[in-house]
Image: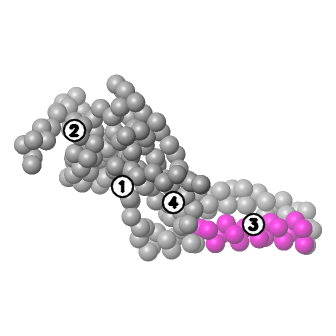
Amino acid sequence: MKEITEFEVSIFEGKRAWYELLLAAVFYSAFIYMVTLTVYYGFIEKSVQIFIRAFVTLLLCGTYSIVYGLRFSATKNLLIDVDTNLIVSRYVVGPFSYDVKSKVTEFEYVSFYEDRYGCFGTNLWYVKNKHYKMYSFENKESAYQFALDISNKLNIDLLDATEKGNFQWIEKQNLK
């Protein structure tokens, strides 16, 4: 029997936009078409020269299609169990999901920062310099609000690392 675990913090990315799902469907369809052609020319028509071309096309373009299909259809959910200090990253594509579990000793603080591309990311730090990359955001306010919510739920400190070399601890008592 499967054990049901209650998670203290559950963060769901949400659903994809309709145009992302449409693009994913196009990429998946292209992949299925290439697989069908490869099987047809390899086993039904038995044309070696065309089979080799179809197989090479499947390897090159099929890999591209399946990767971008996953990129446009996958969502990431983050589950944190405070009692056992377990972080579960759940990647979901339609009805299928894949869990990546990370066991940590103790959560230390949450930080938000600006990367070299102008996006804002959030990290959950544990055991001195080890961290878990959570999400990226388009603007600073969204990253700040997300990091603040996580730090409040986990009852840990919050670090503003948006300015390189000028890190600032944020006092949460003044924000309430």
The magenta stretch spans which residues?
A: 27-44
Give the mark nearer the N terminus: 2 vs 1. Answer: 1
Give the mark nearer the N terminus: 3 vs 2. Answer: 3
Q: What residue type is labelled 1?
A: Ile
> Residue 140 at x, y = what percent?
22, 50
Q: Identify residue for label 4.
A: 92
Foreground tag (3 vs 4): 4
Give the CA separation, mark 1 to mark 3: 36 Å
Q: What residue type is labelled 4?
A: Val
Question: At 20% across and 31% down in the image, what residue appears?
Answer: 167
Q: Nearer the viewer, residue 53 or 129?
A: 129
> Which secondary structure lies at badge 4?
strand
Residue 35, disc? 3
The answer to whether residue 159 is seen in the rendering is: no
Q: Identify residue for label 2.
A: 158
Give the mark nearer the N terminus: 4 vs 1. Answer: 1
Q: Does residue 39 show up magenta in the picture?
A: yes
Depicted 104 relative to depicted 79: above or below? above
> Residue 109 at x, y = what percent?
27, 35
Query: Are the residues flagged by discs 1 and 3 in contact, CB closer than 8 Å?
Result: no
Question: At 24% across and 54% down in the image, what residue appears?
Answer: 142
> Which secondary structure lies at badge 3?
helix
* Label 1: few (<14), some (14–19) or many (≥20) C-alpha neighbours in 10 Å: some
Query: Are the residues flagged by discs 4 and 2 in contact, CB closer than 8 Å?
Result: no
> Residue 169 at x, y = what percent?
17, 33
Q: Identify residue for label 1.
A: 11
Q: Which amino acid does label 3 sit on?
A: Val
Foreground tag (3 vs 2): 2
Question: At 39% across and 45% down in the image, what residue appears?
Answer: 81
Judge from the rendering whether residue 169 lies leftward or rightward of residue 16; answer left or right. Answer: left
Give the mark nearer the N terminus: 4 vs 2. Answer: 4
Judge from the rendering whether residue 155 lies leftward or rightward of residue 72; answer left or right. Answer: left
